[in-house]
Amino acid sequence: MSQMKSISHLDNAPSTPGKFKMDKSPYIHRLRWHSSMAKIAFYSFVFVGILLVFFLRSPSPTSSAAAAADPARRALITSTWGGASWEKRVRSSARVRTPRGITVLVTGAGGFVGVHVSLALKRRGDGVLGLDNFNDYYDPSLKRDRQALLERSGVFVVEGDINDGALLRKLFDVVPFSHVMHLAAQAGVRYAMQNPSSYVHSNIAGLVSVLEACKSANPQPAVVWASSSSVYGLNSKVPFSERDRTDQPASLYAATKKAGEEIAHTYNHIYGLSITGLRFFTVYGPWGRPDMAYFFFTKDILSGRSINIFEGPNHGTVARDFTYIDDIVKGCLASLDTAEKSTGSGGKKKAPAQLRVFNLGNTSPVPVTELVSILEKLLKVKANKKMLKMPRNGDVQFTHANISLAQKELGYKPTTDLQTGLKKFVKWYLGYNSIMGRKSVG
């Protein structure tokens, strides 16, 4: 593992985003407002989801067996924590090393965005403690390698589940966190069709568990959490603005993230928690997720396997607002730095608290076909492409972020175009697999 010290994965070459025009396809038109029944149906889902939260969190005689069978819950019965030496590591990792530093609990620290945010916070002298259950949604060895990277940087990652209320209470007893960066979630649009309960468990029950711990803490931390651009669902008005409707989710993943935004509003209103939601747009880069297209396209191109490229109705373009990880990290840190203090104490609200939602994107959608062309040039291998109609699996035809609010409030300004970002990813990917002695990861 010590060989991994040679990996260089974050350089800061700025570039200017390009421009993209969406095809004039019949798919792109302003949708009519849904009827009141459609709205009732959506908010009924939110209500049922909240009920499921308490169902999933309630103990039962078979809870241990269920946890053992469910990868998303496995950490609840296998993780160990507590003791003097454990508490010493927690305090050391969370110790602030600059006069104006903050103390941050980062959930999902073993994940893609989590590892980059944790490293950035640690580099500038903030206190950082990670939390992750290292589930097997994708290859856990990649998560363990991210953990090793954090450990070498002085960040301790506690192994445990966000639904473990006793663990969260213990962490807040040991460290008075000023901020929580909640990035732990069940990701992926398509996987929701295979394992829907994991999305309710992580994205709804897990969020409630974290907010419960935060509202009961004294002092209450400010909370920044990862929502998703998927909440825009079937909207055809582009670019997507925070003011646009978000009651038309195209996937269960999107619906759980939308439910999360409503839950966040509730905890802000009742308990005075300062909460900021971030709607990420197709994040990519080194140490990324193997289930993302740019990642498995790279793997399949190198191995000679064919890749499926989807197209919209009437051969319409499928495009994504690809956003490089460094730009996302800057938005996350700016959100933490501008977060106001929560106004509650011990679960009781004393005054209105800050509630915000921001788009974090690149503002320059790129067709997936162009993504593949860039990868072919960087890898120096011709892809075996298969053009297919977009299936009804929750994916949408395009995403495009309006980031004017984040620019105004956070000073957010993405600087990395897709060509530059993919070059950095490919360099990391080839180096990582070479050092680890693998043909490909994922």
Image (cartoon, helix red, strand yellow):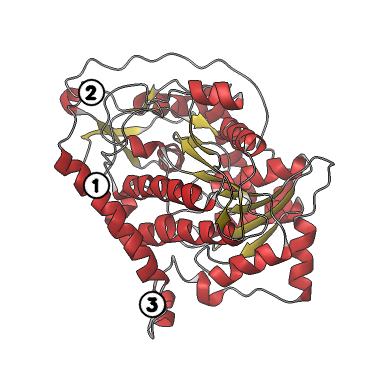
Label 1 environment density (alpha carbons within 10 Å; few <14, some 14–19, many ≥20)? some
Camera-near label (1 vs 3) is: 1
Tag 1: amino acid: Phe
Does residue 31 sit above or below 40 in this rendering? above
Note whether residue 430 is visible.
yes
In the current view of this chain or complex, which residue is farthest to the front?
350
Total tally of numbered discs in the picture: 3
Work out how far the residue at label 3 is from the one at label 2, CA to CA, in angstroms: 44 Å
Q: Earlier in the sequence, mark 1 or mark 3?
A: 1
Rendering quarter of residue 158:
bottom right
* Residue 214 shown left or right of residue 270 in the figure: right
In this rendered view, identify the residue nearer to me: 70 or 246: 246
Residue visible at 38% across and 68% down in the picture: 54
The numbered dot on residue 316 is 2
Residue visible at 37% across and 21% down in the picture: 239
| Contact check, label 3 and label 2, Cβ < 8 Å | no
